[in-house]
Amino acid sequence: MKVCLTGGIASGKSLLCRYLNELGVKTIDADDIVHSLIPEEERARLRKIVFNNPEERKKLEARIHPIVRKALMEAIDGGSSPTIAVVPLLFEVQWEKDYDIIACVISSREKQIERMVANRGYTHEEALARLAAQMDAEEKARRSDYVILNDSTEDNLKAQAVKFVQYLASRS
């Protein structure tokens, strides 16, 4: 069973993955694969270019996405224990057919903005721009098999991680 976790920026995917890992569920994050391919200083330079230039973004994605997709599939298919792929832009890159179950972490726009400003150093305007560049969270949730709302406490998210693992166990 191939499982994918998706969700918008600052929705809580990383924290949920930490809880899943604590529960013995392995995860592999598409963003981590990209980070291993492109050094931080280069990523910062590329972000400025591609965020404002859709043509340049498409060129970069055409080079990077096949590598990331292959690495995700190898990790999922080749692992000794089940591994969940974390693909923030799953629907945007149209990889949803690669997975049997898609889970989506969503948060209100207000919470996402609050987290981006507090934890990532974005201005309010930068946070809005990042959100505008992504698919709407409700649309991602609508297209997913399982939805986790992360607008509450970390303990609540941890409890939802347990429920998600139980859900997966019931499906295997």
Image (spheres, grey):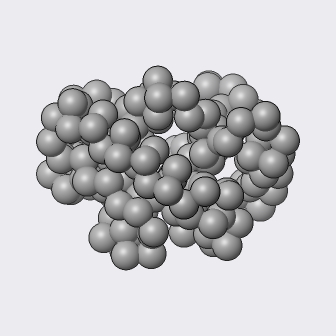
* Residue 2 at least partly seen: yes
Give the left or right position of residue 145, taking residue 58 as reference.
left
Q: Residue at x 25, y 53 (%)?
A: 149
Give the left or right position of residue 108, taking residue 46 as reference.
left
Give the left or right position of residue 11, taking residue 97 as reference.
left
Q: Residue at x 18, y 47 (%)?
A: 151
Q: Is residue 105 above or below residue 146?
A: above
Q: Residue at x 45, y 69 (%)?
A: 144
Residue 9 screen position, x and y as percent = 38, 48
* Residue 88 at least partly seen: no
Residue 93 appears in which quarter of the rendering?
bottom right
User: How many discs appear?
Assistant: 0
Residue 66 appears in which quarter of the rendering?
bottom right
**Front-most of 61 and 85?**
85
Quadrant where the C terminus sits is bottom right
**Front-most of 144 and 140?**
144
Residue 33 screen position, x and y as percent = 70, 37
**Front-most of 54 and 132?**
132
Q: Is residue 103 above or below residue 26?
A: below
Quadrant where the N terminus sits is bottom right
Residue 128 screen position, x and y as percent = 26, 55
Residue 157 screen position, x and y as percent = 27, 39
Q: Residue at x 66, y 41 (%)?
A: 83
